[in-house]
Amino acid sequence: MAKPKTVYVCSQCGYESARWYGKCPSCEQWNTMEETAPQLSAQAPAKPMKQRGGTGSNVEKMSDIAAGVQSHEPTGIAEFDRVLGGGVVEGSLMLVGGEPGVGKSTLLLQVCDKLSRIGKRVLYVTGEESARQIRLRADRLSATNSGILVLAENAMDAVEEKLNAVQPDFVVIDSIQTMYRPDLASAPGSVSQVRESAALLMRYAKTNGCTVILVGHVTKEGSLAGPRVLEHMVDVVLYFEGDYQHEYRLLRAVKNRFGSVNELGMFSMTGEGMIPVENASETLISHRASGASGSVVFCCMEGSRPMLVDLQALATQSFYAVPKRTVNGADQGRVALLLAVLEKRAGLKLYNQDVYINVAGGLSLSEPAVDLPLCIAVASSLSDVPLPSDLAVMGEIGLAGEVRAITQMERRINECARLGFKQIMCPTDSVKKLKKIEGVELIPVNTLAQSVAVLGLRRR
């Protein structure tokens, strides 16, 4: 009997090869080819089918296909529903990823509790913890009186059998890396095991109209649930941001076939579970230092949600040959570009200054509207002149020092006015078509040099 050949599988894209490569021919990643033991079977191999299997459906015209109504079922947790676009969709497959201990299992157990209390049949499948551990967490979350069904199992054949017997409306798999198919020889967590387990759950979700949520770990490179192929299979990809040093956890939609991909939900991690933070703007600026230079309020847009954040900068005399540039919460390359524009177009000398940038609250800002407040914060710290406490700044900056228009200006201004900000510095082009808001003074600017001069931020 011939010895079975070893197969090498890429841990990133799932590419299979009979020989090892230092660089994957498919995704071109280095050192991702892993040796996989061949599948052993005592039975004789079945003859291959002459025709490939399929669904057996016929070709239909687009106009003849019944569209139906896509409805979102609210879970009762407002921030979770916001990120999903209104709630969970029947028959959808979702993936939730994040760092260990960020609160994925806690939040999903709370979601299961809410759904079970409104009459949904909920099944929580755990492959990492015992049923007793789930009970202890449920006691802490006051979720023991609900009708949640718990299954401690990681063999997909047994899970599929229980799914067919219970016929749940909502299923949580915690986590997908611990699940395995017994008919595959590879270890749990490998590309083939994760892909086949997710495929089985996807078929069940689409066939039975059951909503399935997969919990995925984060690799050392920061990718969700290991192989990227899993993100293409699911309908929704959610990512939990936050760490042990921050009180707040951010739930962000990376992919969503049923809603916006830019929505953001904020939660507060407490001993009683994840508490939704509905008024995020007030929470993020509640601890803002008063009378300190280098602090400016900026209104960012996370999907359809305006949020006020405290953007801080510190410029201090450098004692190094090359001044330091430390950035937390913004793109470091973009900050270096803006500092060059600030020095060239506004006349502020930063060549001998260490500059530190921080976005309070743990947010990560990437939209162009953060350019002007970032420059104003640096200029305020450099000149040691505090900004007015009721001032908000927003606008994009070009290489010539011009202040460009930004989107959704009206929603940003309304959010600033709601929290008591009476002065708003913004691009001139963005305020031409806006209606005047009572009690709010708009300060339109055309150039970066003009905005620095209006606020009196010339270096002493």
Image (tube, grey):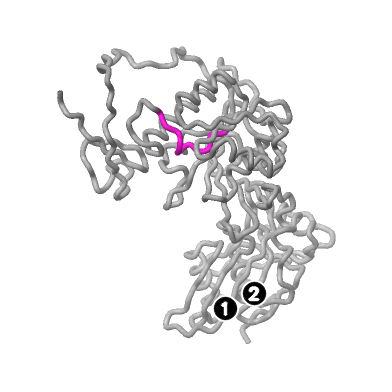
Residue highlighted by disc 2 = 294
Q: CA distance from mark 1 to mark 2?
A: 8 Å
Q: Position of residue 383 (x, y in %)?
A: 63, 82
Residue highlighted by disc 1 = 315
Q: Quadrant of the C terminus?
A: bottom right
Asked whether, in this view, residue 242 is left or right of residue 409, the answer is left
| Outermost residue toward the left in this view | 1
The magenta-colored residue range is: 172-181
Q: Quadrant of the N terminus?
A: top left
Front residue of this view, candidates 318 and 456: 318
Q: Earlier in the sequence, mark 1 or mark 2?
A: 2
Relative to 158, say whether 241 is above or below.
below
Relative to 42, say whether 456 is above or below.
below
Task: Label 2: state its secondary structure.
Answer: loop
**Is there CB contact under 8 Å for labels 1 and 2?**
yes
Front residue of this view, candidates 393 and 137: 137
Residue at 64% from the left image edge and 74% from the top image edge: 294
Asked whether, in this view, residue 352 is left or right of residue 272, the answer is left
Q: Position of residue 204 (x, y in %)?
A: 51, 23
Residue 427 visible in the picture: no
Asked whether, in this view, residue 420 is left or right of residue 209, the answer is right
Check if residue 180 falls in the magenta segment.
Answer: yes
- In the rendered structure, which amino acid carries the disc numbered 2? Gly
Front residue of this view, candidates 300 and 145: 145
Task: Label 1: state its secondary structure.
Answer: strand
Q: Quadrant of residue 247?
A: bottom right
